[in-house]
Image (cartoon, rainbow, N blue to C red):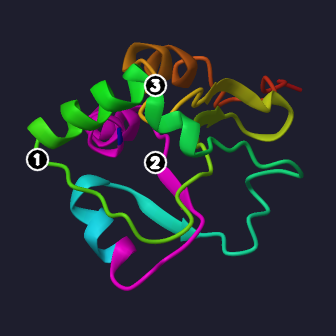
Amino acid sequence: EASELSSLRPQLDTLGVPLYAVVKENIGTEILNFKPYFNGEIFLDEKRGFYGPRERRMGLSGFLRTGVWRSGWRAFQNGYWGNVWGEGFVLGGVYVIGPRHQGVLLEHREMEFGDKVKTSDVIQAVKRIQTEFLPLRLR
């Protein structure tokens, strides 16, 4: 998913919107290995404050889901290996957050591992970001 979101970078740059990733751990060279797939700034949240008061998890039973296996196979076919170290059960998500009062414009929470957001939904939400807040008044 990181590489698909990174493919939106030229459009995001044109619209003046940055691309960020928040990760929960950095075991060994995990973040360094992630950088070739993600063309944005990466933040490490070891205290998991961004993940909220209740982390959403998928247990071992998640590996019995066909969607998880399909996502894993799709990633493997596209040359993405990932790793098997670390915690590994917290589900992720994608958010488009507007400035100040706008708040969350898109919230996509993984329902199972590999449940990806539609990039068209991301672009649609990004285009809703307000860049001007107050009209200028002439005196």
The verdict on residue 110 being magenta is no
Give the structural element (helix, strand or loop) at label 3: loop
Residue 52 x %, y %: 82, 50
**How dense is the environment of label 1, judged by Cα within 10 Å: few (below 14), some, or many (20 and up)?**
few
Q: How many labels, in total?
A: 3
Q: CA distance from mark 2 to mark 1?
A: 23 Å
Q: Write the start and end of the magenta stretch as one range.
A: 2-31
Residue type at the position of mark 2: Leu
Residue type at the position of mark 1: Gly
Q: Which mark is residue 79?
A: 1
Q: Where, by quadrant of the figure, is residue 32 drawn? A: bottom left
Q: Residue at x 32, y 30 (%)?
A: 69
Residue type at the position of mark 3: Arg
Mark 3 lies on residue? 65
Residue 73 x %, y %: 21, 33
Horizontal arrangement in the rendering, residue 105 relative to residue 91 (left or right): right
Horizontal arrangement in the rendering, residue 40 relative to residue 102 (left or right): left
